[in-house]
Image (tube, rainbow, N blue to C red):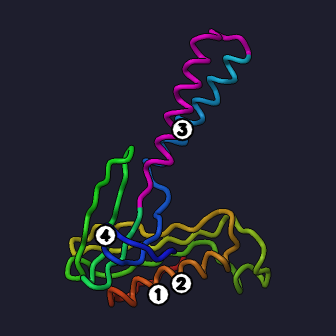
Amino acid sequence: MASGPGGGEKGLEFEVRGGPWEGFHALVFYAAVACAVLATAGVARMATGICAVALLFYSILAVFSSPTCLVILPEKKAVAWERYRFFFPFRREFSRDDLEEIVVQEWGLSGAEGEGRPSGRSLSYSARVYIRQRGGRKHRVYRSEMSGSPAENRTRVFLVVEALSAHLDLPISYSSR
């Protein structure tokens, strides 16, 4: 989480990772790697080489020019999602009245946070934070990283939920599987 300007207003801002957009561009990147391997092997060398370079530049441009950020606007008691698709900004703002609750979901914690190994990595652990609208639609705010330990990810979840609940005064719903 970083504090910074959110669309010209002072707000708390952090990046939301994952989703179908990033997944699609990961597949494009792997297709670029496959074309590069085929070009190196001599299979339609010119066509697969050009295809590899084009797909590689497309995937780099798409991933680095297309972040999604959540901006908490404490003055307005609102939250805004800023999405960029190839440097074109899209902004959706929701006031406190449009939002119902913060939903925290955790999977895969066994025992006392992994049997007393706070630095151990656990690929089976996952945590997600959503904001639910009044109509029932959920917007993902945070997804745990695979590189951190469960204790580190729980700390990040706590910080995100604490920031949201402090500024928006929303109730928190917690579930564990």
Judged by depth in the image, the label closer to the viewer, 1 or 3, is: 1
Left or right, residue 81 beside residue 150:
left
* Spatial separation of the CA atoms under disc 1 and disc 3: 35 Å
Q: CA distance from mark 1 to mark 4?
A: 24 Å
Q: Give the labeled residue for mark 2.
A: 158
Q: Nearer the viewer, mark 4 or mark 2?
A: 4
The residues tagged by marks 3 and 4 sit, at their Cα atoms, a distance apart of: 35 Å
Which residues fall within the magenta stretch? 41-68
Q: Are marks 1 and 4 in contact (CB under 8 Å)?
A: no
Q: How many angstroms separate mark 1 from mark 2 (CA)? A: 6 Å
Magenta stretch: dominant SS? helix
Confirm whether the magenta stretch covers residue 63.
Answer: yes
Instruction: Please name which of the two marks, 3 or 4, marks the residue nearer to the observer.
Output: 4
Q: Are marks 1 and 2 in contact (CB under 8 Å)?
A: yes
Question: Badge 4 is on which residue?
Answer: 8
Q: Return the x and y of residue 145 as percentages of the image width and height.
A: 61, 65
- CB under 8 Å between callouts 1 and 3? no
Residue type beneath disc 1: Glu
Label 1 SS? helix
Determine whether, in the image, residue 80 is placed left or right of residue 17. Answer: left
